[in-house]
Image (spheres, rainbow, N blue to C red):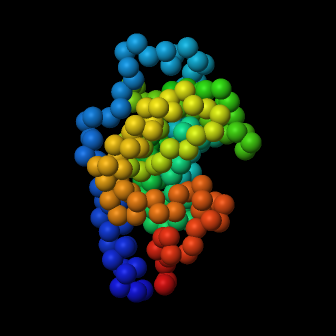
Amino acid sequence: MSWHVARVWVAALSLASVESSPVEGQLPRAPRDSKRLASPNITCVVAKLADGDSFTCADGREVRLLLIDTPELAQAPWGQMAKRQLETMVRPGTAVRLEVDRMSVDRYQRTLAYVWVDTVMVNEAMVARGWAVVLAYENVRHLDRMKRAECEAQAAKRGFWQAWAFRCRPVDFRARRCGASSWPQRGK
């Protein structure tokens, strides 16, 4: 392992050990006059996390968090770090409320949802803590607040913005638009 890769791994491990962020206790809350309850809501109990932006409910329903994108598990170590951060908020056994938007299911038949634990929108908390970036398609109900959370996390260098800074955004990684130097690789 080269010196540079070793330094990146040390930084990654120190980031991974941080379970709380500078915004702990200041998680994004739903406005009291929020109209989010106007859309259908579904309750589920988290059974298993797939990665940092999707999980499976106890009833078998697969859920993809709306408006966020986290590093893929193959983007080691960043993908595992994002998954661990999601688990701090929705570990298996947690009851969550799923708020759907315009399009409620994706092409993989996953439920597309804003995930709520009490009054905390998990999607927004992942972005505000710096463990996810905003990714918008047709579902945009909370887009403005998500963009604000991303700008604030980036400016404050929270989560991944401290070291890695999303040099290879997950959407670009999936499209194979990133060079191998965009993230550390094991054994090199």
Residue at 30 percent across and 64 percent down: it is 14
Residue 112: quadrant of the picture: top right
Q: Is residue 77 visible?
A: yes
Residue at 32 percent across and 59 percent down: it is 162
Nearest the viewer among 34 and 49 is 34
User: Residue 27: percent from the left, percent from the top?
Assistant: 32, 35
Q: Give the vertical position of 6 relative to 98 (above or below).
A: below
User: Residue 183: percent from the left, percent from the top?
Assistant: 48, 70
Nearest the viewer among 133 and 79 is 133
Q: Give the vertical position of 174 relative to 68 (above or below).
A: below
Q: Is residue 65 visible?
A: no
User: Residue 47: percent from the left, percent from the top?
Assistant: 54, 42
Q: Give the vertical position of 24 relative to 36 (above or below).
A: below
Residue at 40 percent across and 64 percent down: it is 164
Q: How many marks?
A: 0
Task: Specify whether 30 is left or right of 64.
Answer: left
User: Residue 124: percent from the left, percent from the top?
Assistant: 43, 37
Residue 170: quadrant of the picture: bottom right
Residue at 50 percent across and 70 percent down: it is 182
Task: Specify whether 89 is left or right of 155.
Answer: right
Looking at this rendering, what residue extends furthest in the bottom direction? 2
Q: Could you tell me which quadrant the N terminus lies in? A: bottom left
Nearest the viewer among 118 and 138 is 138
Task: Specify whether 50 is left or right of 163.
Answer: right
